[in-house]
Image (cartoon, rainbow, N blue to C red):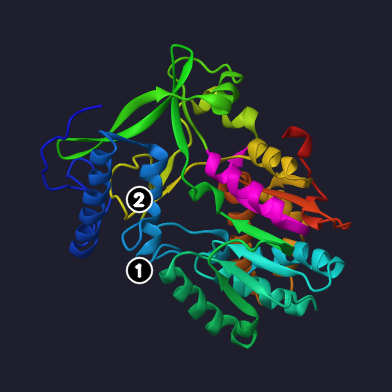
Amino acid sequence: MPSDPPRPVPRPVTAHESVGLPAPSEHERALSEQLCAAIRDEIVRAGGALSFARFMELALYAPGLGYYSTGRQKFGEGGDFVTAPELGELFARCLARNLAPVLQALPGGDVLEAGAGSGALAAGLLLELERLGCLPQRYLILELSSELRARQHACLAERAGHLLDRVQWLDDLPQTIHGIVVGNELLDAMPAQRFQIHNGKAREWCVAWDGDRFAWRLGDELAGDTAVRLAALDLPDGYTSEINLAAEGWVRTAAERLEAGVLLLIDYGFPRHEFYHAQRAQGTLMCHYRQRAHDDPLILVGLQDITAHVDFTAIAEAAHAAGLDILGYTGQGQFLLASGIAEFAGHSDTKTQLRLAQEIKKLTLPHEMGELIKVMAAGRGVDCALPGFALNDRRGRL
């Protein structure tokens, strides 16, 4: 590890790095500089480099400075990226059709949404479950960011104010869960380890400080079960990708605490044999900043989202190891079509039909969100079919 280098003022963005990306405001730049300085100090204390997983954790979640801890708008057209619930009401209405039979089978069951974003999905689910006569007694939101909690409360108050008394915010997963756990674009934002195959061994990518900016540094070989798992993939030298042990651990904990109910996960990802395909030899790491996507997580620190796609085979294995049955796995487009999304566009005026048709295309077409995003359900103690998997269940591909 290198010795402690001189301490230049951190520069989170340079002219070269920001080519093609909008410049941050002075306020944003100042926040990013503070976060860069804090990360750099931790790099020095660690002996010269941090694992990328730790860098990603700090960039996204450092208190008061990380991407999800500050007040910048993140979701929707005015933010950095658009999630399915931000497009309109159809996604939530279809999802509610899959929650309803579970709530009917589990009287008194709760809905727990982990990482509720802007609150749009929570509002949409509550309104549709009310229409279906299947309202949960409690709608629990696991959210660590106080800034996002405030946004979620405001969204719910505006769109579903009469149901706000059913909503409770949590700091951690309950010790026991009876009902449904929903995670929409949750796992891809959990800190992932990055690795490269070098002389047949998986070595961890780390982040160092190089003069006036962050830089990649290849660290030690990964060890233990992680090394064994990656060795079994027989990847070629130079292959770079990710493994997300944090996401697997979260799923395992949620599954262990689910005494009866369903874990429903929606995220960008693939089964393992596709995740580590030769076409993805540079991994799946992606950043989002003001509706632009790029692959450099070491710039715009604290100002951009950082994600890594989900290995759904690993997620299924984690859920199964905790005693859950895998109930279904498919693409988002097939899931929504099986849940009746087309029906919602047929009973409105022409202008509304056109708007809904555009929303359906964005959500379901393979080159849009329809195939890039997958849906997986796992459960315990429930005997009901989720309609979203009726058309195309790919559990056999996991």
Tell me the quarter of the picture where residue 63 sits.
Answer: bottom left
Q: Earlier in the sequence, mark 2 or mark 1?
A: 2
Which residue position is annotated with label 1? 71
Q: Magenta segment range?
A: 244-270
Give the left or right position of residue 104, taking residue 162 as reference. Answer: right
Residue 91: image location, x then y, percent: 64, 63
Disc number for residue 306: none
Residue 44: image location, x then y, percent: 23, 39
Spatial distance from mark 2 to mark 1, Cα to Cα? 15 Å
Q: Nearer the viewer, residue 237 or 279?
A: 237
Q: Nearer the viewer, residue 397 or 106?
A: 106
Q: How many marks?
A: 2
Q: Residue furthest top?
A: 199
Give the left or right position of residue 229, taking residue 78 as reference. Answer: right
Tell me the quarter of the picture where residue 396 sits.
Answer: top right
Q: Nearer the viewer, residue 20 or 63?
A: 63
Query: What is the three-letter code of the residue carrying label 1?
Result: Gly
Which residue position is annotated with label 2? 59
The answer to whether residue 397 shows anywhere in this view is yes
Q: Is residue 229 above or below residue 122?
A: above
Q: Secondary structure at mark 2?
A: helix
Q: Residue furthest right?
A: 383
Q: Secondary structure at mark 1?
A: loop
